[in-house]
Amino acid sequence: NSYRVAILGATGAVGRELLELLESRNFPVSDLKLLASERSAGQRLPFKGEKLLVEPVSDAMFENVDLVLASAGGSTSKTWAPVAVEKGAVVIDNSSAFRMNPDVPLVVPEVNPQAAANHKGIIANPNCTTILMTVAVWPLHQVKPVKRIVAATYQSASGAGAQAMAEVKTQASAILEGKEPTAEVFPYPLAFNLFPHNSPLNDWGYCEEEMKMVNETRKIFDNQQIRITATCVRVPVLRAHSEAINLEFETPFSPNEAREILQKSPGVKLLEDWRKNYFPMPLEATGKDEVLVGRIRQDISHPCGLELWLCGDQIRKGAALNAVQIAELLVEENLLKPKAATYVS
Ligand code: A2P
């Protein structure tokens, strides 16, 4: 079987990565539509040796489409995902629009692949920081339940899109030339700087990104008891997030046992050289599929506490790769039926 696929937001940072991944992972595509706003209509993007035309999104674009990979922001998804589903497509949505909807599975294939089976047309791809954390914490949680997670994140510009990445480079050049940096996408200059995550704050002083880590992790783990708190920070890194994670278990969890587990865990690569003080770094995680984990150590402040550090490519496992893995899972589990096959069965 092969499938008629549409990428909504094809010109964006995640959209372009989706295109690359569909090709490099040889996803069975029979037809591919590249959709974006009017602004990029007429652009061409490479796929399997061809230059495919980018078209403005409209109702008609979702006719005869089996799978939509959407990464064009929340409001665009809210408008178009229901249209695509109505026309018979399955939508894997990268935005936050449907993530907490009880009818929409929120899936990290290494963690809760079974949730995908309950989809009603839309499957949500979790927040990038949450995906990376769950890939590393889930295998430990399977052995000894985690009671509490305290996370601090060091998030790249890519989470805010292609323009944000370009802005950091422009700011860096300006500063190196002795000029005043300007900020348009971000509220403040990010080059040679950092600031608490620029998402809206709630009444308790938590930003949306931090609440995503709390609520989405609980939904993915199917466990409302885990206590989670996070501090999310933007750092002048282009496309890989880092996270310092403190885990509290019911009973002690030895760093060596955690290492043995993580060494065998899907989607995780252990990277530690204690002699050289060499651990995961954003530049090393860039372009890689795995979440790099290291600096696993006993929390000296708590007998049942464990510290770890991770880095992961925000555009890849944090977004596009996770979405393509969900699509592969749908194909494997026969949850994505091409229309032709539906008529036959
Ligand atoms: P466009 O390039 O035409 O603006 P990023 O997250 O890197 O900023 O990318 C966002 C993606 O979402 C881009 O492909 C962008 O297309 C697309 N997009 C943004 N707003 C809309 C919209 N209203 N309709 C369709 N696509 C949109």
Image: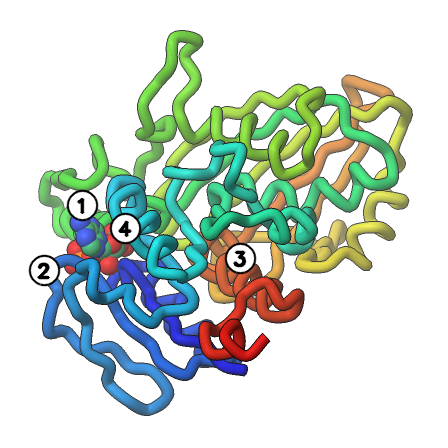
Q: Residue 281, how many percent across, how many down? A: 55, 52
* Residue designated by label 4: 80
Near mark 1 (Cα within 10 A), the count class, few <14, some 14-19 or many ≥20, is some
Total marks in image: 4
Label 4 C-beta lies within 8 Å of the nearest ligand 1 atom: yes
Q: Which amino acid does label 3 sit on?
A: Asn
User: What percent of the width, then of the height, locates residue 53?
Assistant: 19, 78
Structural crowding at the residue carrying mark 3, measured as other residues with C-alpha within 10 Å and reported as few (<14), some (14–19) or many (≥20) = many
Does 322 sit above or below residue 133? Answer: below
Q: Is residue 138 left or right of residue 309?
A: right
> In which quadrant of the rendered image does the N terminus lie?
bottom right
Per the image, the residue denoted by label 3 is 322
Spatial CA span between label 3 and label 4? 21 Å
At label 4, which amino acid type do we have?
Trp
Dividing the picture into quarters, in which one does residue 55 lie?
Answer: bottom left
* Residue drawn at point x = 77 percent, y = 18 percent: 301
Q: Does the residue labelled 2 lie within 8 Å of ligand 1?
A: yes
Which sits earlier in the primary sequence, circle 1 or circle 3? Answer: 1
Q: Mark 1 points at which residue?
A: 175
Disc 1 versus disc 2: nearer the observer: 2
Earlier along the polypeptide chain: callout 2 or callout 3? 2
Q: What element carries label 4?
A: helix
Q: How far apart are marks 2 and 3 (CA)?
A: 27 Å
Task: Check disc 2 and report the residue beneath it.
Answer: 38
The disc, 4 or 1, on the residue closer to the chain's N-terminal end is 4
Mark toward the start of the polypeptide (3 vs 4): 4
Marks 3, 4: nearer the viewer: 4
Across and down, in percent, residue 284 comes to 54, 61
Q: Farthest top residue? A: 203
- The location of residue 248, given as percent across then percent down, is 77, 24
